Amino acid sequence: MAKLRFYYGTMGAGKSTMALQIHHNLVKHSQGLLITQHDREGRAVSSALGVSAAAEVIGPHDDLFTLASTEISSRGEVDFMVCDEAQFYLSSQIDQLVRVVDDLDIDVFAFGLLTDFMGHLFPATARLLEMADERNEIQVESRCWCGELATHNARLVDGVQVYHGDVVVVDDGSDTAVSYELRCRRHWIDGEGKPAKETLRSVG
């Protein structure tokens, strides 16, 4: 019986690496789809370790049940779907993945973040937690600058942590520098980044 499996972790926990590994292992002996949204390399699933694979890029108007059904018609069968960056999907698309599992008997492996930079569950993540057959926290421990376990993804605008704004930021060509940093809960709440190194002055 097919299952919907959800794997989650912070940035840097190896979600995309694991997605690529599962796809690599399964595609040797079965037919499958690798899909993503908002990946750093566009039409691919890519890992910070430097490995990547071509993928189907979906948007908010794509029906994942229809996508799987169409692939079955053209290929003859589809055995699995690996879905990276699942936090960016719509909640309705998670329900479509549930239908892929239950009605088409296709295994689905979804990978994503739990919370956004404001500390809130992504809507798609919440739906995955509600509907998945299996919920698995990736056990690679990311660390805050202080050495404690990182639990939150902080958004920095020109080096200063912010707590409000659009969940998805699209490059608008402005000079504003947006970056992300892993932090423990205490330093995420405080907005405290790594202290600048003190300038050493020689004496005498």
Image (cartoon, rainbow, N blue to C red):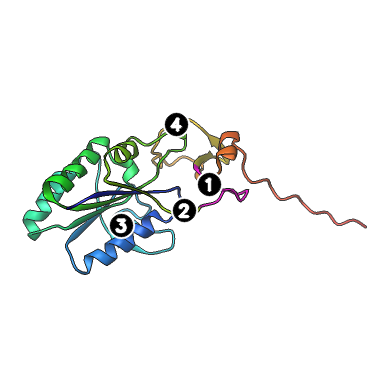
Asked if the magenta segment contains residue 165, the reply would be no
Between the C-alphas of marks 1 and 4, the distance is 22 Å
Q: Based on the displayed image, in which of its 4 quarters is residue 53 positioned? A: bottom left
The spot of residue 18 in percent (x, y) is: 36, 59
Q: Secondary structure at mark 3?
A: strand
Q: Secondary structure at mark 2?
A: loop
Between the C-alphas of marks 4 and 3, the distance is 27 Å
The disc label shown at residue 165, or none: 4
Badge 1 or badge 4: first in the primary sequence? 1
What is the crowding at mark 1: few (fewer than 14 residues within 10 Å), some, or many (at least 20)? many
What is the crowding at mark 4: few (fewer than 14 residues within 10 Å), some, or many (at least 20)? few
Q: Based on the displayed image, in which of its 4 quarters is residue 102 positioned? A: top left
Badge 4 or badge 3: first in the primary sequence? 3
* Residue receiving disc 3: 44
* Residue receiving disc 1: 150
The disc label shown at residue 12, or none: 2
Q: Main secondary structure of the magenta part?
A: loop
Identify residue type, mark 4: Gly
Between the C-alphas of marks 4 and 2, the distance is 22 Å
Give the residues in magenta.
142-152
The C terminus - image quarter: bottom right
Asked whether the residues under the numbered discs 2 and 1 touch, taking CB atoms below 8 Å apart as contact, a structural biologist would say yes
Badge 2 or badge 3: first in the primary sequence? 2
Q: Residue at x 31, y 51 (%)?
A: 84
Identify residue type, mark 2: Gly
